């Protein structure tokens, strides 16, 4: 979770951190469409205080999710082989995307919306995945006709599956996915 964007009084800083903490908990429990009123109630603050810190839902989502998305953008697992590295990244994506119900869908929506506050961090994550996919394709292990958008859509489906079927091993599904993408 990010720090406040500008210097604040101690009580405002405390409220900012409390909002982030309660929003993260609410998003994990009930999903990213949890009402902002519920988050304000959980934090024992007024909705006006929440809106002073986060004028839109997207601003709050960016503050809560931005670090996770940046971690996905910088994650470069070292597996030893290109498709193993891609598989590890997919497993990491699924684990991160299932931390908050609805995150996988939010990532896809933010990628398609350049005006979204999450667009830049989702685009950086997209670029990382594209690089890992290209590496695996250049090593001849992944089919050359697989496009990054295909991969991210399939990764989102994995995250959705893991989210809706708790206990389903995400790494098993990631391995199955990459196995299906391999050159024959």
Image: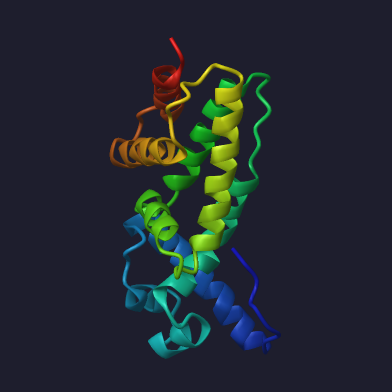
Q: Position of residue 60 (x, y in %)?
A: 47, 72
| 123, above or below 158, in the image | below
Q: Position of residue 167 (x, y in %)?
A: 36, 31
- State the residue at coordinates (31%, 36%): 161
Q: Which residue is at the far front?
A: 145
> Of 4 and 183, which appears nearest the observer?
183
- State the residue at coordinates (44%, 60%): 25
Q: Which residue is at the far right?
A: 7
Q: Quadrant of the C terminus?
A: top left
Q: Which residue is at the far top?
A: 184
Q: Position of residue 29 (x, y in %)?
A: 36, 56
Q: Quadrant of the N terminus?
A: bottom right
> Of 172 and 15, which appears nearest the observer?
172
Count the numbered circles shown. Answer: 0
| 93, above or below 38, in the image | above
| 103, above or below 5, in the image | above
Q: Position of residue 80 (x, y in %)?
A: 68, 19
| 41, above or below 116, in the image | below
């Amino acid at each position: 979770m990010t720090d406040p964007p500008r210097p604040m009084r101690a009580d405002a800083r405390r409220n900012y951190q409390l909002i982030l903490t309660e929003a993260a908990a609410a998003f994990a429990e009930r999903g990213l469409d949890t009402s902002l009123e519920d988050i304000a109630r959980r934090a024992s603050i007024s909705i006006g205080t929440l809106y002073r810190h986060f004028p839109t839902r997207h601003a709050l989502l960016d503050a809560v999710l931005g670090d996770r998305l940046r971690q996905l953008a910088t994650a470069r697992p070292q597996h030893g082989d290109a498709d193993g590295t891609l598989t590890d990244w997919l497993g990491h994506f699924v684990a991160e995307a299932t931390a908050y119900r609805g995150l996988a869908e939010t990532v896809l929506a933010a990628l398609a919306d350049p005006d979204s506050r999450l667009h830049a961090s989702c685009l950086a994550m997209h670029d990382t995945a594209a690089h890992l996919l290209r590496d695996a394709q250049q090593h001849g292990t992944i089919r050359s006709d697989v496009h990054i958008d295909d991969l991210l859509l399939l990764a989102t489906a994995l995250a959705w599956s893991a989210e809706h079927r708790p206990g389903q091993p995400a790494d098993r599904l990631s391995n199955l996915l990459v196995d299906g993408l391999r050159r024959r």
